[in-house]
Amino acid sequence: MQPDSGAIRFAERVMHGVGEDGTRDEIVIWIERRAGAVWAVGRAINPSQRNAKAPRRDDFVFEGYELGDALEAANDALSDDLLISTRDGVNEDVQPFTEEELLKPLERWFFGHNP
């Protein structure tokens, strides 16, 4: 799944769950940086099965200027999905998002390098 035009995906987590029909779902949660110093957190189910690769507007669970708020939103979404997946019998060890993993690519991007 490609980020929005002009957005750069800085971190991503992939996990699995069980869909309403009993099939295995892929859940992708990501943090991206957009023009205007905006952080965004997205969450999509089975994005590889979509016709359009770009995220939809309703995929986003957070948009704002504070990195800490983006981390909180991303980790809340991740925790919720992990809890539900565990209840459904899918146990995965998916690490939370960290500030450090976002600051390194942010610094590279700020100085004109690819994140």
Image (cartoon, helix red, strand yellow):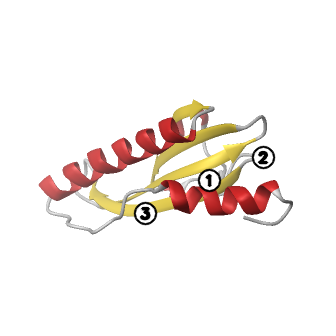
Q: Up-down: is 76 above or below 109?
A: above
Q: Nearer the viewer, mark 3 or mark 1?
A: 3
Q: Residue at x 22, y 55 (%)?
A: 85
Q: Is residue 14 left or right of residue 81?
A: right
Total number of numbered discs in the rendering: 3
Counting from the top left corner in percent of width and height, residue 83 is at: 20, 50
Label whose residue precedes the other's in the sequence (1 or 2): 2
Residue bearing mark 2: 5
Kind of residue indicated by mark 1? Asn
The residue under label 1 is 51
Q: Could you tell me the amino acid type at mark 2?
A: Ser
- Crowd around label 3: few <14 · some 14–19 · many ≥20 (10 Å): some
Res 11 → quadrant: bottom right
First in sequence: mark 3 vs mark 1 = 3
Instruction: Mark yes or no: residue 1 visible.
Output: no
The Cα–Cα distance between marks 3 and 1, rounded to whole angstroms, is 19 Å
The image quadrant where one finds the C terminus is bottom right
Q: Is residue 77 above or below residue 24?
A: above
Mark 3 touches mark 1? (CB < 8 Å): no
Q: In the rendered structure, which disc, 3 or 2, sits on the residue that comes first in sequence?
A: 2
Q: Position of residue 27 (x, y in %)?
A: 40, 56
The residue mark sitting in front, 1 or 2, is 2
Where residue 53 appears, x then y in whole percent?
65, 54
The answer to whether the residue labelled 1 contacts the one labelled 2, judged by CB atoms less than 8 Å apart, is: no
